[in-house]
């Protein structure tokens, strides 16, 4: 049976991921910062099959939670609700939205390390962050294993990254493990992995070459 998937953030990314999740047969709930009622119609039109819910309910009812909200907002969430949850951090630091980076993320950390430090008891994996929502929409190949694009995955625990790899595969992309959460930095805006929609080989090559230089 598929795990229950919850998405926090019902904007461009969250809605496309809800579509992918429904298409792959996952039970999926999705929340914005507002009560469920405010996104119910949008979700029913854009991601039929997904259920709009309040964020607290999404967190409590889900096995896997995708963070698809602005990076500057994750500390509005109550970390105690995330105990033992598998959390996919799809967020990026974006200065126009989030303000100065150093007010959010310590300079020596990748953004996902800071997310893990906040959600201490959750199992954080970085994924689904480096490709644009339109590419996640247009380039998914859930039923074909050929001509696929790759999604990079970074995490400190192999069991957790494998669970996320299954989701990435179900969504129609090839999973590419790139190392621990600290290595996730290469996927952040301004870094070689950001904005990429490449095959697995091409993405691996790009990350290896750029990270070595
Ligand atoms: N757009 C992309 O192509 C893309 C691709 C990969 C990664 N990302 C990353 O994904 C995140 C979202 O980007 P986006 O483009 O989807 O932004 P967006 O369209 O502005 O949507 C942001 C969503 O987050 C919700 N939100 C804010 N605070 C929340 C909270 N405390 N709890 C639950 N939901 C909350 C907002 O709800 P309200 O409207 O109620 O405030 C809104 O639904 C960002 O970190 C971005 O860097 C985006």
Image (cartoon, rainbow, N blue to C red):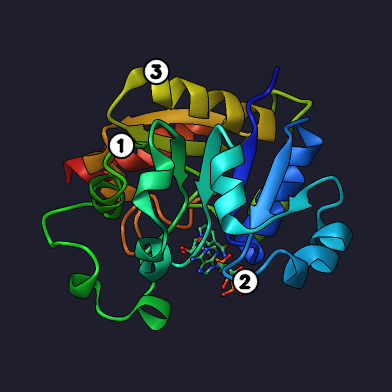
* Residue under the point 86% across and 58% down: 44
Between residue 41 and residue 211, name the one nearer to us: 41
Residue assigned mark 3: 159
Residue 87, disc? none
Q: Which sits earlier in the primary sequence, circle 3 or circle 2?
A: 2
Q: Quadrant of residue 3?
A: top right
Q: Is residue 46 above or below residue 5?
A: below
Residue assigned mark 2: 34
Q: Quadrant of residue 20?
A: top right
From this viewpoint, is residue 157 visible? Answer: yes
Q: Position of residue 74 (x, y in %)?
A: 39, 61
Q: Quadrant of the N terminus?
A: top right
Q: Position of residue 47 (x, y in %)?
A: 81, 54
Question: Which residue is most to the left?
Answer: 108
Circle 1 crowding by C-alpha within 10 Å: few under 14, some 14–19, many from 20: some
Q: Is residue 23 above or below residue 76?
A: above
* Label 2 within 8 A of ligand 1 by Cβ: yes
Q: Secondary structure at mark 2?
A: loop
């Amino acid at each position: 049976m598929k795990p229950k998937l919850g998405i926090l953030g019902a904007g461009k990314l969250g809605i496309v991921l809800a579509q992918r999740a429904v298409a792959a047969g996952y039970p999926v709930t999705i929340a914005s910062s507002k009560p469920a009622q405010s996104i119910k119609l949008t979700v029913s039109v854009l991601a039929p099959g997904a259920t709009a819910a309040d964020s607290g309910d999404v967190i409590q009812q889900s096995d896997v939670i995708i963070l698809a909200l602005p990076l500057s907002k994750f500390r509005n969430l109550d970390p105690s609700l995330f105990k033992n949850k598998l959390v996919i951090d799809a967020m990026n630091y974006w200065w126009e939205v989030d303000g100065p980076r150093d007010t959010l993320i310590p300079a020596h950390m990748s953004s996902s390390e800071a997310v893990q430090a906040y959600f201490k008891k959750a199992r954080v994996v970085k994924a689904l962050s480096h490709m644009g929502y339109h590419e996640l929409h247009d380039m998914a190949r859930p039923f074909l294993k050929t001509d696929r694009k790759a999604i990079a995955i970074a995490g400190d625990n192999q069991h957790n990254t494998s669970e996320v790899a299954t989701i990435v595969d179900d969504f129609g992309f090839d999973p590419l493990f790139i190392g621990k959460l600290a290595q996730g930095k290469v996927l952040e805006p301004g870094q070689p992995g950001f904005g990429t929609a490449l095959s697995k080989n091409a993405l691996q090559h790009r990350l290896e070459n750029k990270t070595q230089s």
